[in-house]
């Protein structure tokens, strides 16, 4: 459902990660059971990450994973109640609903019953303690790190809750222009004066939150009107030069099947990013053999000191690797699984060259 969760997290540094193929890439929130420490969460620094293609739909009758919360399909990250968080120097692309969402959560939703002594410490059910003084700046929206345009459905969404203070968006960039709701987000004089940002309320955002609060309370998703539970459509790219993420891009430049099909592979994609979707996109035996050989060299290569060969990484033969990837890469939920991780974990558990072929 989410690549990362830090309910009531305090002073966490989240950096240099790839968040992808979730319903929601990252959640930091105040929605918790009473007694959870740290309320309200504050002071997370989220920087130098990639948030992309978080469009997984788990809210279907035949889902393999039963969702516990109504998360918004197609969203890079949200702050669902939190203060003094910083979101900077990240890339957000191909999130079909939104890049980021920030909204306030009334204390009354999380305080807990005082009568049994389990009330949330620091909570006051007459107040709204979140979301205040969150800074979003110097992010790149709708563009991949390789420079290709791949838009989000909307870059930024803020509930503009009445009385919320100090939330600022500034120096964010997009090759097709920043999109947001409200249309004019406070930039706080380029971030120098957060006091210039004061929420005034917005009926559209409030209505959306109210509808989806019923899904949170009931945990009933079939037929629920909450828009978060319905997969958004792919907004595509902005200039016609690249797809919106729905077409597989093979990571190895000399795949003949890729060239023949018109897909332009990226020669500089690290093998550490090759996933099940790439395995499935390689239609010929020659392509898959090449991919297995590259992964084996990547995972099982020599480990050397400055002067001595110390050993090598774990290794599978082609039959074992092919069976492994075929078994894992079929389901839709596994399309983002990294091949080298599947490979190295299996080999580490004794499925090395010469071991029996893997079963189903």
Image (cartoon, grey):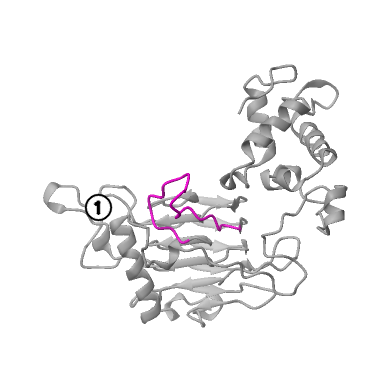
Main SS category, magenta section: loop
Residue 100 magenta-drawn? no
Give residue 304's position: percent from left, percent from top.
80, 26
Give residue 117's position: percent from left, percent from top.
15, 47
Residue 53 magenta-drawn? yes
Q: Dividing the image into 4 quarters, which one contains the C terminus?
A: top right
Tell me if I can see residue 164 in this picture: no
Residue nearest the viewer, comparing 72 with 277: 277
Residue nearest the viewer, comparing 39 with 106: 106
Q: Which residue is depicted at the point 53% across and 76% down? A: 180
The magenta stretch is 52-72
> Which residue is identified by label 1?
121
85 over 301 or under it: above or below: below
Tell me if I can see residue 250 in this picture: yes
Give residue 181's position: percent from left, percent from top.
49, 77
Question: Residue 74 vs residue 39: left or right?
Answer: right
């Amino acid at each position: 459902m989410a690549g990362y969760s830090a309910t009531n997290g305090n002073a966490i540094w989240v950096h240099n990660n790839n968040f992808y193929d979730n319903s929601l890439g990252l959640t930091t929130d105040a929605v918790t059971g009473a007694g959870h420490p740290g309320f309200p969460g504050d002071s997370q620094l989220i920087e130098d990450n990639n948030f992309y293609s978080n469009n997984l739909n788990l809210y279907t009758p035949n889902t393999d994973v039963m969702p516990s919360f109504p998360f918004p399909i197609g969203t890079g990250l949200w702050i669902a109640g939190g203060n003094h968080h910083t979101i900077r120097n990240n890339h957000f692309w191909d999130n079909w609903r939104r890049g980021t969402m920030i909204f306030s959560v009334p204390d009354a939703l999380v305080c807990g019953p005082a009568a049994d002594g389990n009330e949330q410490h620091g909570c006051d059910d007459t107040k709204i303690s979140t979301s205040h003084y969150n800074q979003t700046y110097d992010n790149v929206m709708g563009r991949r790190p390789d420079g290709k345009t791949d838009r989000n459905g909307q870059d930024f969404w803020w509930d503009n809750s009445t009385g919320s203070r100090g939330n600022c968006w500034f120096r964010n960039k997009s090759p097709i222009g920043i999109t947001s709701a409200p249309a004019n987000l406070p930039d706080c004089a380029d971030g120098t004066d957060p006091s210039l940002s004061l929420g005034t309320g917005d009926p559209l955002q409030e209505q959306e939150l109210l509808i989806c609060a019923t899904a949170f309370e009931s945990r009933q998703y079939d037929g629920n009107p909450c828009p978060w539970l319905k997969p958004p459509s792919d907004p595509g790219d902005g200039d016609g030069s690249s797809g919106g993420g729905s077409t597989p891009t093979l990571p190895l430049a000399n795949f003949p099947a890729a060239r023949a099909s018109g897909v332009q592979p990226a020669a500089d994609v690290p093998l550490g990013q090759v996933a099940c979707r790439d395995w499935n996109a390689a239609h010929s035996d020659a392509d898959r053999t090449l991919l297995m050989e590259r992964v084996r060299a990547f995972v099982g290569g020599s480990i050397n000191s400055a002067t001595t060969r110390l050993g090598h990484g774990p290794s599978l033969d082609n039959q074992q690797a092919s069976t492994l990837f075929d078994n894992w890469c079929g389901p839709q939920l596994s399309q983002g699984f990294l091949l080298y991780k599947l490979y190295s974990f299996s080999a580490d558990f004794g499925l090395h060259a010469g071991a029996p072929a893997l079963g189903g």
